Amino acid sequence: MNMSQKTNNVPLLRFGNFKDSWNQQKLNDFAVINPDSNKLPEQFIYIDLECVNSGELLFENTVFRSDAPSRAQRLLEIGDVLFQMVRPYQKNNYYFNKIGDYVASTGYAQIRTDQDSKYLYQYIHFQKFVDRVIERCTGTSYPAINSTDLSNIPISFPSLPEQQKIASFLTTVDEKLQALKKKKTLLEQYKKGVMQKIFSQEIRFRDDNGKEFPEWEEKTLGDCLNYEQPTEYLVTSTDYDDSYKTPVLTAGKTFILGYTNETNGIFNKRLPVIIFDDFTTAIQFVSFPFKAKSSAMKILIANSEYNIKYLFEAMKNIKYEIGGHERHWISKFSQLEIQCPCFSEQTKIANFLSAIDDKINHCQTQIEKTEMWKKGLLQRMFC
């Protein structure tokens, strides 16, 4: 491949032993886009757009060529880079480094270079590059770029040794991120498994003296929880801003709609509470003062001798099919039965599960910080 003239491009952050200016050229001068594939093997693992998330291959589906989708056309080699052509802002790209027969969907651009392919993989996540891709996309619901427009986007690159140094460093950051995500997943799986054993009473706690707690009793959710309509806590302004302090909660899984500076009518009594969506029965655990957006919410408050965190975890195990537009808490949900231990055992269970939650949340915080750190690195290490 012909190298272009050197430019004055230099990144803000680089390794100290490299001083030369970077080159710039179109992607198709730096790499081959969608190289010709040989005849597909009789059987292969098919990678479509649903298989990849955050640079990881989530699952591997083996298909026969005769049964494969028509989009299965990109026969992969180690070092190939897959770039997501549809909704590229999601950055669900993939660096291929596996042994065996793998074929990717034409929803990806298959990029092959004789430069450092890991450098290229990192560069396609650089926001400046992504912005250039988005500028060339067509379509509204599913914006996409074609391979010709992609191939004409300019990229900047240093000498091969510096490419390798950058790629090695950023790959190490990716490996740290993957390790944190795996740790979080394992903690979530552990919590799910231990919850099944706790609520089936396969695991029982003892009091501080090692004695058994009394047998569990059957209660209805209405026995354990009282509800309050959010009427007096409803926000009146739609002027939300992340710089404001008070979160605005809405029904369903959106949860925090935004932040408000309204100071009147903030719910802050008997925290924590459970937010219940009357139409979808989604629940959220809330331990901070808030304003409400939706009248479909119920604010569930634990009655005396009941631990709100225990009840929240117990409610997550309830399988309930909804229907119509009735008020589910009043008509049905409050009448459902759950097994309740004594208050002391409820508290032991709640504290145990909260300790796991703390570890999961700590992992999530580390993930977010590392992702922000890497985003900053990409902005300063590329140009």
Image (spheres, grey):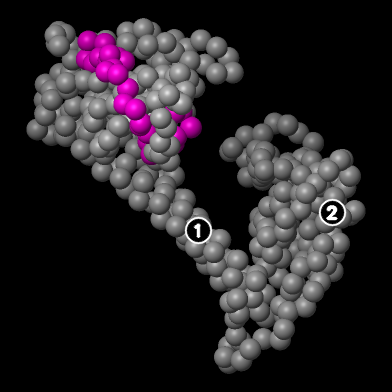
The answer to whether any part of residue 8 appears in the image is no
For marks 1 and 2, give the CA distance. Answer: 29 Å
In the image, 229: left or right of 92? right
Write down the quadrant of residue 195 in the picture.
bottom right
Residue type at tag 2: Trp
* Residue at the image point whose x is 35% and y is 31% from the top: 43
| Residue 188 on image: x %, y % | 51, 57
In the image, 148: left or right of 279? left
Q: Is 8 contained in the magenta span?
A: no
Mark before the other along the chain sequence, 1 or 2:
1
As drawn, the label of residue 16 is none
For the C terminus, the image quarter is: top left
Q: Is 51 contained in the magenta span?
A: yes
Bounds of the magenta span?
27-56
| Residue 20 on image: x %, y % | 11, 21
In the image, 195: left or right of 54? right
Q: Residues within 10 Å of mark 2 (few under 14, many from 20)?
A: many
For this rendering, which residue is in front, 93 or 268? 93
| Residue 9 on image: x %, y % | 21, 17
* Residue at the image point whose x is 85% and y is 64% from the top: 222
The residue that disc 1 covers is 189
For this rendering, which residue is in front, 104 or 55? 104
* SS at circle 1: helix
| Residue 295 on image: x %, y % | 83, 42
The residue that disc 2 covers is 329
